Image (spheres, rainbow, N blue to C red):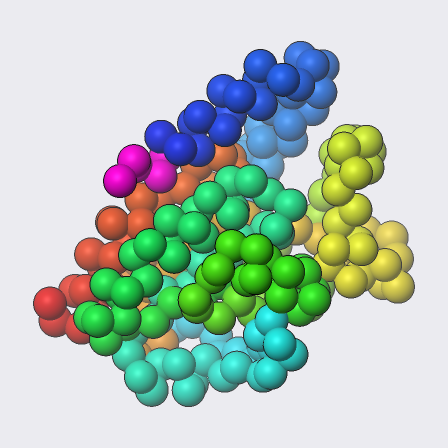
């Protein structure tokens, strides 16, 4: 199977061939500004205790972290939204690895700020076998140090490519900056006692950890 980062680099190359340089410059500026903010250094690190949570899945059913961790170590994949080709490609990679993860005794849950309705579309379209959970207003992501407010120049860019973040995330009524919350894509592995065993997040949304690397951390957590 092709390495995930190779697949993501192909998306980037294709995008650069199709999108005008001035539009690409907006994304490059946003990545540079986010990196300069130091947000990568502020994420919940390995060794910390992860917060407990209860979030709705794609069907609207509440899912408790305590119930998931009662079954085994837990991989958490924080993603930006179904509109993000990089996130979808990463989740599809996990779709292929999910049987191995479950056979080992570990679990995976994907978490994004989009509404349950958006998640339901994504689960069906991409045949995702694991729970896809909604984090309203990026509240849980903020506890992991992953949430940030999209600057005005980047909001204008998203509007120009018809990505309506407040609509997708159901935050239109919050208004102002609150409705323009987004998260760093991130991957965590939690031990059953909520201790963080693995933590990776990148200011550059085009970079993700290899799922095989994360799987190894999850297997170590179950003693395999």
Q: Position of residue 161 (x, y in %)?
A: 76, 33
Q: Position of residue 17 (x, y in %)?
A: 58, 14
Residue 146 appearing in the image: no
Q: Position of residue 70 (x, y in %)?
A: 33, 87
The image shows residue 223, relative to residue 207, as above or below, that is below
**What residue sits 60% from the left and 83% below the top?**
61
Residue 15 falls in which quadrant of the image? Answer: top right
Q: Nearer the viewer, residue 108 or 198?
A: 108
**Rendered-image quadrant of the C terminus:** bottom left
**What residue sits 79% from the left and 46% below the top?**
164
Residue 36 appearing in the image: yes
**What residue sits 71% from the left and 20% below the top?**
23
Residue 10 falls in which quadrant of the image? Answer: top left
Q: Nearer the viewer, residue 21 or 38?
A: 21
Q: Which residues are magenta?
A: 1-5
Q: Which secondary structure type mostly characterizes the magenta part of the structure?
A: loop
The image shows residue 94, relative to residue 62, as above or below, that is above
**Rendered-image quadrant of the N terminus:** top left
120 sits to left or right of 4: right
185 sits to left or right of 108: right
């Amino acid at each position: 199977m092709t390495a995930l980062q190779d697949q993501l680099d192909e998306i980037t190359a294709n995008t650069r061939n199709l999108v005008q340089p001035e539009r690409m410059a907006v994304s490059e500026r946003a990545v540079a500004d986010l990196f300069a903010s130091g947000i990568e250094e502020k994420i919940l690190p390995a060794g910390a205790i992860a917060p407990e949570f209860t979030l709705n899945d794609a069907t609207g059913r509440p899912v408790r972290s305590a119930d998931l961790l009662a079954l085994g170590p837990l991989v958490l994949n924080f993603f930006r939204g179904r509109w993000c080709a990089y996130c979808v490609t990463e989740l599809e990679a996990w779709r292929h690895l999910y049987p191995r993860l479950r056979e080992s005794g570990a679990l995976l849950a994907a978490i994004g700020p989009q509404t349950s309705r958006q998640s339901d579309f994504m689960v069906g379209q991409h045949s995702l076998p694991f729970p896809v959970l909604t984090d309203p207003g990026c509240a849980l992501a903020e506890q992991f140090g992953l949430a940030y407010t999209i600057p005005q120049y980047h909001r204008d860019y998203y509007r120009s490519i018809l990505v309506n973040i407040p609509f997708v995330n159901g935050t239109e009524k919050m208004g102002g900056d609150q409705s323009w919350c987004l998260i760093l894509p991130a991957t965590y592995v939690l031990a059953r006692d909520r201790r963080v065993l693995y933590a990776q997040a990148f200011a550059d949304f085009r970079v993700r950890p290899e799922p095989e690397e994360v799987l190894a951390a999850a297997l170590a957590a179950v003693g395999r």
